[in-house]
Amino acid sequence: MWTSRLRPILSFMRLALTLLLTACATTPALRAAGPCPDQTLSIYFADNSAELTAPARAVSADAAHQARRCPMREVEVVGLADYRGPPDVNLALSRQRAEATAHALEQVGLPAPRFSVSAQGEAGAVASPGVAVPMRREVQVVIRFSR
């Protein structure tokens, strides 16, 4: 007698579980859980180089992976250089760094049409001579998401 009363309940529970599992299987794995905060990255370069290092490529790939879950508005890529050397050479080097970084970000999945690429050269770089740090030998990347 009690089995006849349980049978419809068990059938309903089986149907509900099937629907739940089906919904979970078709839901995208990466979905924004709320507003996505903008990301800011610093990609560092060796002295007089515009070639991305292995750690720089890893940072780029990780940022692109994290950004896939959010609708992207724009990616700002700004190349910088330190104070050593002629200003025109530093500006060209900072442009090459920005373009190399933008290309690497595009290769790992960020949408290139949303890129804003610029160079500042040595503008604002201040350090005492002989400082052996990656000061301003970098590209700053800001990934802005739609709100």
Image (cartoon, helix red, strand yellow):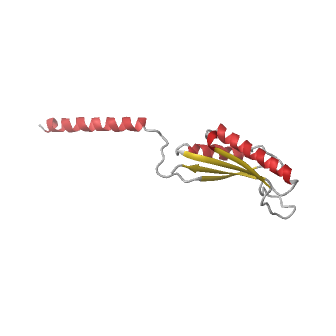
Q: Residue 128: x, y in percent?
A: 85, 65
Considering every residue shown, the one lying at the far bottom of the view is 128
x, y percent for residue 71: 53, 45
Left or right placement of residue 85 versus residue 50 in this view = right
Residues 88 and 145: in front is 88
Work out whether 62 lies above or below 84: above
In-front residue for pair 106/30: 106
87 lies left or right of 120: right
- Figure disc tally: 0
- Residue at the extreme left: 1
Q: Residue at image x 55%, y 54%?
A: 37
Residue 94 locus on image (x, y percent): 78, 49
Q: Is residue 116 visible?
A: yes
Residue 96: percent from the left, percent from the top? 78, 44
Res. 84 image quadrant:
bottom right
- Inspect this view and state whether residue 66 appears: no
- Which corner quadrant holds the N terminus? top left
Picture residue at 77% right of the left edge, 46% below the top: 95
Against 105, residue 81 (above or below) is below
In this view of the protein, which residue sits in the foreground, 16 or 1? 16
Relative placement, left or right, of 17 versus 64 is left
